[in-house]
Image: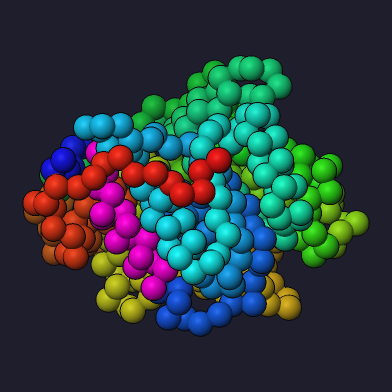
Amino acid sequence: MIIEPRTRGFICITSHPKGCERSVLNQINYIKSKGKIEGPKKVLVIGASTGFGLASRITSAFGSNASTIGVFFEKPPAEGKTASSGWYNTAAFETEAHKEGIYAKSINGDAFSNEVKQQTIDLIKKDLGQIDMVVYSLASPVRTHPTTGMRHKSTLKPIGGSYTNKTVDFHTGEVKEITIEPSAGDDIENTVTVMGGEDWEMWIDALKKENLLSSDFKTVAYSYIGPKLTEAVYRKGTIGKAKDHLEKTAFTITDSLKDINGKAYVSVNKALVTQSSSAIPVIPLYISLLYKVMKESGVHEGCIEQIHRLYSERLFINDTPLDSKGRIRIDDWEMRDDIQEKVAALWKEATTESLPTLGDLEGYNTEFFNLFGFKYDEVDYSLESEEVIDIPGLQ
């Protein structure tokens, strides 16, 4: 079938298998170009099919020749209907890994559930024995709690009062003012339940109970802080409460791993175009300005560059540098004073008319469609593509 992008609000409801393959190959080639990393050898990636999770799986496999198991929740293809991009990403990753004799298997299901945890435990026992790293990179908006059966939905709201600021519709380029109403009722509790650290801790506890974690085991989860420009809706909003909980959980997990000399880290990463960030008001405008400034300063990074730097310069060196709150800061280039001062100045001037010059809206738009396999120069989108593609190692 001929596959074209079809958008609905802040998501694309189609994805292109050849474009997703191109995205994965570009990331693999980047990691190969950087040489070997003295990193993990047996890795579980929870949330492995897109963004930082996919980049972590690629970096583990092609940077340090690691065997990887990926867990994710993606829509499979059907005749005449494309899969979600994460499905095609994983198919391309596993195909390339298997070509090079690298172990790679995947589980598609609800990572919050006890059933998927048990299926993963059984697979590790059967194939790997023990693992030396878990990457936790889930970005789900909803969670059915495995103990209570209750369904919790996260929100992206300020706390204590409404918030008004500029945002951009990255499809049309219109800069407009938006007001976001404050959280109410159980919004904070629900958001923490979905996006906090409880499920991460549940995974580690379940794996440790089965003696599946090797000595000197590491686990890392991903977080974001961001600038003052976005803090009302992000770090000081409902999602920020969830990130606070996630970061506190790292210390709880580390305490539970003392007997195997294990460590849990939170890595604070930079702002990037993701399916999640595209849905957060204010963030697309901030990212479009940030990209322009960081590219001009020669310090722009995508997911794969961020994770390579995390592995090679933070996680797998003798003394991992941490901030005053015990976090790894791989957002250090984004948060440089000179970068933030320039972004703040541009923010004041940003309008529908000025943004094409002031910001990198075109870059934002391209990266958004790249998430779904579109807008790659190497792909001829006028050709028919096979939409039904299998993931070689899917269990």
Give how far across and how far down residue 26 sits, in percent.
Answer: 34, 68
Residue at (64%, 77%) from the top-left corner? 38
Compared with 186, 83 (above or below) is: below
Compared with 208, 348 (above or below) is: below
Give how far across and how far down residue 62 sits, in percent.
Answer: 51, 70
Compared with 11, 367 (above or below) is: below
| Camera sees residue 307 | no
Give how far across and how far down residue 316 sits, in percent.
Answer: 66, 73
Numbered marks: total:
0
Magenta extent: 13-29
Quarter of the picture containing the N terminus is top left
What secondary structure do most residues of the magenta stretch adopt? Answer: helix
Examine the structure image and report whether residue 25 is included in the region drawn in magenta.
Answer: yes
Q: How is the image coloured?
A: rainbow
Q: Nearer the viewer, residue 16 or 391?
A: 391
Quarter of the picture containing the C terminus is top right
Q: Does residue 266 appear to the left or right of 260 in the view shown?
A: left
| Camera sees residue 62 | yes
Residue at (62%, 34%) from the top-left corner? 116
Q: Nearer the viewer, residue 104 or 144?
A: 104
Q: Quadrant of residue 122?
A: top right
Residue at (20%, 47%) from the top-left corner? 385
Give how far across and how far down residue 209 sits, in percent.
Answer: 84, 42
Q: Does residue 252 appear to the left or right of 70 in the view shown?
A: right
Residue at (56%, 19%) from the top-left corner? 151
Q: Nearer the viewer, residue 388 or 45?
A: 388
Examine the structure image and report whether residue 136 is included in the region drawn in magenta.
Answer: no
